[in-house]
Amino acid sequence: MDYTLKEMMAIVAAREIQNSDIVFCGTGISMLAAMAAKNINAPQSVIFFETGAIDSELEDLPLAVGDSRIMYHASSNSGLLDAFATMQNRFTCSHVVGILGAAQIDIYGNLNSTVIGDYHGPDVRFSGSGGACDVASFVSRSIIFMKQEKRKFKKKLDYLTSPGYLDGPAGRKKAGLSEGGPDCVVTDMGMMAFDSESKKMFLRGYYPGIIPEEILQNMEFEIDVTRAEEIKPPSANELSLLREKCDPHRLIL
Amino acid sequence: MDYTLKEMMAIVAAREIQNSDIVFCGTGISMLAAMAAKNINAPQSVIFFETGAIDSELEDLPLAVGDSRIMYHASSNSGLLDAFATMQNRFTCSHVVGILGAAQIDIYGNLNSTVIGDYHGPDVRFSGSGGACDVASFVSRSIIFMKQEKRKFKKKLDYLTSPGYLDGPAGRKKAGLSEGGPDCVVTDMGMMAFDSESKKMFLRGYYPGIIPEEILQNMEFEIDVTRAEEIKPPSANELSLLREKCDPHRLIL
Amino acid sequence: MKVNGYKVKKLDDAVKTYVKDGCHLSIGGFTLNRNPMAAVYEIIRQKIKDLHLYAHSNGQGADELIGAGAVSCLEIAYGGTGKFASTCIRFRKAILEKQIRVEDYSNYQMTLRFLAGSMGVPFLPTRSSLGTDIIKKWGFGPEFREQNLKLPDKKMVELENPFDDWCDTKKVVLVPAINPDVTIIHVQKADYKGNCRIDGLTFADVEQAKAARTLIITCEELLDDDYLKNNPDRNQIPFIHADAVAHIPYGAYPTACYKYYDYDPVFLKQYAEFAKNEGRYQSYLESIYSRKTHTELLDSVGRERLEMIMADKNRGYARKLDRR
Amino acid sequence: MKVNGYKVKKLDDAVKTYVKDGCHLSIGGFTLNRNPMAAVYEIIRQKIKDLHLYAHSNGQGADELIGAGAVSCLEIAYGGTGKFASTCIRFRKAILEKQIRVEDYSNYQMTLRFLAGSMGVPFLPTRSSLGTDIIKKWGFGPEFREQNLKLPDKKMVELENPFDDWCDTKKVVLVPAINPDVTIIHVQKADYKGNCRIDGLTFADVEQAKAARTLIITCEELLDDDYLKNNPDRNQIPFIHADAVAHIPYGAYPTACYKYYDYDPVFLKQYAEFAKNEGRYQSYLESIYSRKTHTELLDSVGRERLEMIMADKNRGYARKLDRR
């Protein structure tokens, strides 16, 4: 069965979500991945938004986390304060999985979504943190979407917007952050995870038709590829649920 | 026209409230004074409660600040957080007048509503601060109800629950509190105010039939009585509105 | 908190499962309104001891727990039930007779402490109580605090404003977060997953609920479907915080439940009388022990009294109730 | 804030009275929802300059104010409008061309800063951003801050937890309070005194409203009586915070207003196109200047487009809207 890379990425991320997870998601493909998990492999998972809606019906795909579509048939509508408190709360935080994207990522999963170049005279400016820094600071796991490009997988970030493992295994603790950190990085070529000891990124899987070498060529830093396996493509069932239930009007796909 | 001391006290306090005031009140006579002001001399004043109700209709007299009677036809029902934030807020605080009571008061208007005797082995225990310390800390003016008794007007408090002017003119500033402080003390014999320079209590007025000397005999500390004048008794209009509109079932009066 | 699942339980099971001897507990409501009284009586019935109780102004519920000897430590802002007991009688007695250790805060401070717990931060700042004995005098001394790992090492801390004079503030008091082992609240409506809808003032219930490791909810109406999702704006507590939901009509009795019933002045006045006398209070406690459920207790009160306190539909309280 | 009185005003008068050159302003809403767009266009029309804008993620409103040259300083968490502009175009351009000074925070930090302002405390704590450049890199340097009395002396401050390791927290970041000169929000219902009822998510509107020295409200429905008092639980902002209330149907257009209308994808897409090109953006601005009121702007959009975005009664948004 034919599928696009976007579909593959959404499904690969969705498979990481479990029934007991509370999924924080942003716009675009991250929202699609959360909806795919709920419709396919984790029907008991709970989707929630930084704007304060939790467990929304999502009959129609929202185009922003401020979209009125997330307010319909939610369990509770509140505001930003409550949403972020849920992620920082000592009891709920361990259940929250964040789905994030960024302009740059380094080997420890730190993210830049602010500037390219000097902060005071940037060459490129992005939207900024939004809730990403908050999510990355608070929650126990995060799933990161990235495009597999050399300029995006950087030895050194131009600006550290959202904390991964900072400078290594002790990084978060030294900085005062809670445990947790990025779980995996889903790209248009494969998927990386983080070594439980060194906290460095390694290649966990590659898409059918891609070889690990290609992935390495599209990164500025070197990662371990010895543990990588080919990732199963989306099944017919996964694809049809994604297309028909999550984004029938192809607003994102 | 006949009136009781309680009626006199409620009316004397009510007269201190103006149309632009937001009146914080507790239970009993303080609630009655706030309702009297609204029904008699300050119809535009706004009554609000630490539990989060603001501008309640008060068709029926509440017997506690948690009484459901304050929830009916309010402008907003929220909770304790919002109520106290309104008093600490830099823009609203200057409009809030608190009405308080206590077990003991000193010459600077500091209040004790916690214990008599040693804090760790008290002879008498009262309810504790509740919101009184918060109100006294935050708001620009407060009206204090006291019984005129020697054991209540103390040279030294057994426990300082709610800040008046602390140890004098610079007291609040040194402690880090905002300006403001107690405005007047209404007792069953008369009314005290605080000198604008020394911040010490002085006698502002005495009820018909009472002489300043009697008031001094019922205080442990000495206050200036030279500025005192006789206080006008409640008018027929004041009394009838108080009795008929505020407490027709005589739950407090 | 339990993310998902069917959370409906019987109240006695929920209390037995989650409220243990020595447990740090907070209860919802304010003075004579929406206290989770059915749960309070169940705790008394199960003779749970040595509770560390966090109260702001939870009048009747706190006083009954203390009166039954269930409480050994108390952090509180206000022990009173308005006109019925300007100082709660068993509360006062327990302090004077040194049956409980007590630590005093203000109402706002207690609320901020629950908010801090719900936000996952160790403290929150306020200007309240600067210059007072609430800062200076500690009911729980440094040693007691050091021995007790569930307590912060300090009652509160004064801090110079690190932003210079920002907001015209030189100094603040930091009050430490509370994360109770268990919070119990009584609400008007809850559903099988634990979504809660509170009518009228929420007091500090929402903060207490979200600050807790375990949340037990009792409710007037239990929805066995997703009806509450039709009005998500009005649901203050989403289900992810909830562990157990018990359907207990009149679960706040003898305190009030806005839109459902008023407080019972007869009960509260009698209680105050009982509380003043040791012998009579023991008989009162025996009567609580002897009634195995809240329904039995309500039966002993009788239909007539319950009808008297029934709320007017429009007003939310019983307008004609004789409260003298 | 104005305690009492009749606060209904015309929008142009309200803006003229309260929004001055150099004013510190915050606007409500989030990305493409409930931005006070009528007020934003009125500010643009009145050619108010040198605004210091506080934004969390107020996408469209912030971008139009920046695009019109009304803003000189910006404190912001996120400059984007979802699918229509993942980074707002005039925002990006203004930063790259150094037309505005900018200071970055996270969304939670901005919200906490408004909450601190509304609570009357100089700061609030969080663990967010520890170890990141959000703490290390300051857009407004110490000198600029020193010269500007309306700014705190520091962007934020790290603090060791003074309660030892309480809540397993070693360190927090303190973020400074914001007290805007003016906050403008758009709500579904408001009354003549300024009581506000927001349907759906409140975003950070309530905190922004209460933090402000002056609050301007625009609303879809204006109640000229005390109708809103029939449901006090649903009124998030009591009148004591309000200064001016203007009745502006479609006042959030082209952003959405839950239960009333959706965002207009045609407008937002066109806007993004205009924003990319200097000449076309100038023409766009001319078209804003040339329409003297929001009604005139809506007339130019036309009835058909407004009907397309009309919200379904049940859903609160326009289900059949073509959003590609």
Image (cartoon, coloured by chain):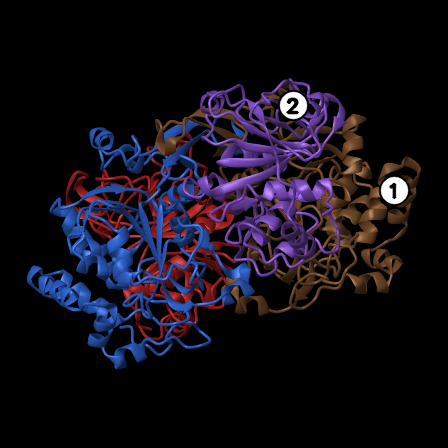
Chain colours: A red, B purple, C brown, D blue
Residue at the location (23% across, 41% down)?
Answer: A221
Count of marks overlaid on the render: 2
Task: Give the left or right position of residue C63, taking residue B232 as reference.
Answer: right
Above or below, D146 relative to B168: below
Residue marked by disc 1:
C274
Q: Which corner quadrant of the image does residue C318 belong to?
A: bottom right
Subunit bearing disc 2 = B
One can see residue B126 in this view: yes
Residue drawn at (66%, 51%), measured in percent from left and top? B236
Chain at numbered mark 1: C
Q: CA distance from mark 2 to mark 1?
A: 30 Å
Horizontal arrangement in the rendering, residue C271 relative to residue B186 (left or right): right
Q: Residues within 10 Å of mark 1 (few under 14, many from 20)?
A: some
Q: Secondary structure at mark 2?
A: loop
Q: Is residue B242 left or right of residue C165?
A: right
The residue beneath circle 2 is: B159
Residue A198 is at least partly visible in this image: no
> Can you say whether D184 is above or below D291 in the image?
above
- Amino acid carrying mark 1 in the image: Phe
Query: Percent from the top left, x then y, of residue B8?
Result: 67, 41
Tell which of D110 and C7 is nearer to you: D110
Amino acid carrying mark 2 in the image = Tyr
